[in-house]
Structure formats: C-alpha cells, structure tokens
Image (tube, rainbow, N blue to C red):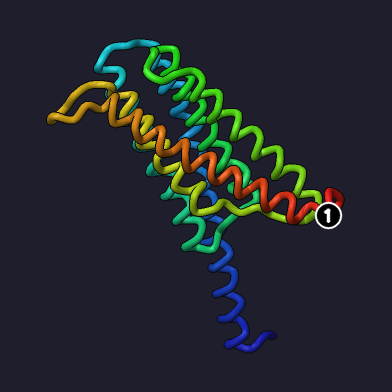
Amino acid sequence: MKPYGGRVVLDIRVHKRKLEKKASNLANGITLFRFFVLPIIMLLLLSDSPWTGFMAGVLVTVAGLSDYLDGFVARYYNAVSDLGKFLDPLADKLLVATALIMLSSLMRVHPIIVVIVIGREIFITGLRAIISHEGVVMAASDAAKWKTVFQMIAIVGLCVNETYFGLNFHITGLLILYVSLGFSLYSAYGYVESFFKNVHYLK
C-alpha cells in the first residue's frame, strides 16, 4: 500500500496531465475554427457588396484573434502539442492566402503582391522542411510575427473596403499590406541566413 503523501502526489500529477490534455484539445479546437471559417470567408468575398465585405472582415478579425488565443492557452497550460505546431501555422497561411486570392479577384489588391506573399510562404516552408532533417528548428522571428499581425489587419481593411468614420479602409489596408510585405521580405532574409548557417552539408 502506497503512503498517503505519495498517493496525493500521484493524484496531482494525474490531474495535471488531464488538465494539459483538455487545454491541448481546446487550443487545437480553436485552431480548427480558423479552418472552418475559411470557406465562409471565400463565399462572402465572391460578392463585391459592402455587407459581405464587412462580414468577411469581422470573420478575419475573429480568426486573427483566435490565433493568439490558442497559443496563449497552449503555453499557459504547458499543453503545446505536435498537432498544434503543425496546424497553427498552416491555418494562418491558408487564411492569408485564401483572403488575398479572393481580394485579388475583386481587384482590391494587385496579383503580384499576392504572388510575392504566397511565394514567400512556400519558399520558407520548404527551407524549414529541409533544415528539419538536420535537427534544427527555425522558430518564428519577431519580424515574422509582426508580418502576420500586419497581414491580418491589412486583410480586414481590404475586406471592408469602405470609408467609415472618415477612415478609408481600402487605402489603409493597402498601406498596411505594404508594411507587412517589408516585414515578410526582411524575415525571409533572416530565415535564409539561418538556413545556410545551420545546414551542414551546404557548407
């Protein structure tokens, strides 16, 4: 028979594991929410009406906020999972790519900008896949995190595409998108530099 104190410690550990499991499921569920809203955003952006644009902007805002919520839950409860590490950046990339492609079809953003943004994401994802075989993990840089923030804000502005309270959301969205493009290219340079520093067989 185990001592009472040892049983208490065991119960605490079991409870902690259960809590971490629930937190992990919650975080992954929040991430999956972003996949769920993608087709809704696509359908809304098939129309050029102010109402559908506004609703798409609301959904992109909620999806962007959920990105930080799932990360907060996972880190706070120490419930970061391999599935979450895979799904979270994938959801962000699909959200940005989907929204920009649809906005390009509405003539709200130039196709070249869309190609640069999506091309950058594919290129960096490829570098990360290659370098992972060397046992090196390229964590997201501060510039990359700010890139995502500005992209989300820009997409919201371009979705709304109207003037409210004296603010032209279309022009504001474009300006912020160009700012995000600067962060995107700068962070890409950092990833490439890190890649060549860490991939041994290229030295």
Q: How many marks?
A: 1
Percent x, y of residue 144: 51, 47
Q: Which one is in front, 92 or 109?
A: 109
Is there any visible trace of residue 19 in the rendered image? yes
The residue depicted at 58 percent of the width and 80 percent of the height is: 9
From what the image shows, is residue 103 above or below residue 85? above
Is there any visible trace of residue 26 in the rendered image? no
Percent x, y of residue 24: 54, 53
The residue depicted at 25 percent of the width and 16 percent of the height is: 50
Q: Which residue is mark 1?
A: 200
Residue 202 in the figure: left or right of residue 169? right
Q: For the N terminus, give its image quadrant.
A: bottom right
Percent x, y of residue 100: 46, 24
Residue 168 in the figure: left or right of residue 20? left
| Quadrant of the rendered image containing residue 188 | top right
Q: Which one is in front, 82 or 201?
A: 201
For disc 1, the neighbor class at 10 Å (few under 14, some 14 to 19, many from 20) is few
Residue 94 in the figure: left or right of residue 46? right
The residue depicted at 64 percent of the width and 32 percent of the height is: 122
Percent x, y of residue 114: 50, 24
| Quadrant of the rendered image containing residue 163 | top left
The residue depicted at 44 percent of the width and 18 percent of the height is: 110
Q: Tell me the element at label 1.
A: helix
| Quadrant of the rendered image containing residue 157 | top left
Residue 25 in the figure: left or right of residue 161? right
| Residue sitting at the far left | 165
Tell me which amino acid carries mark 1: His
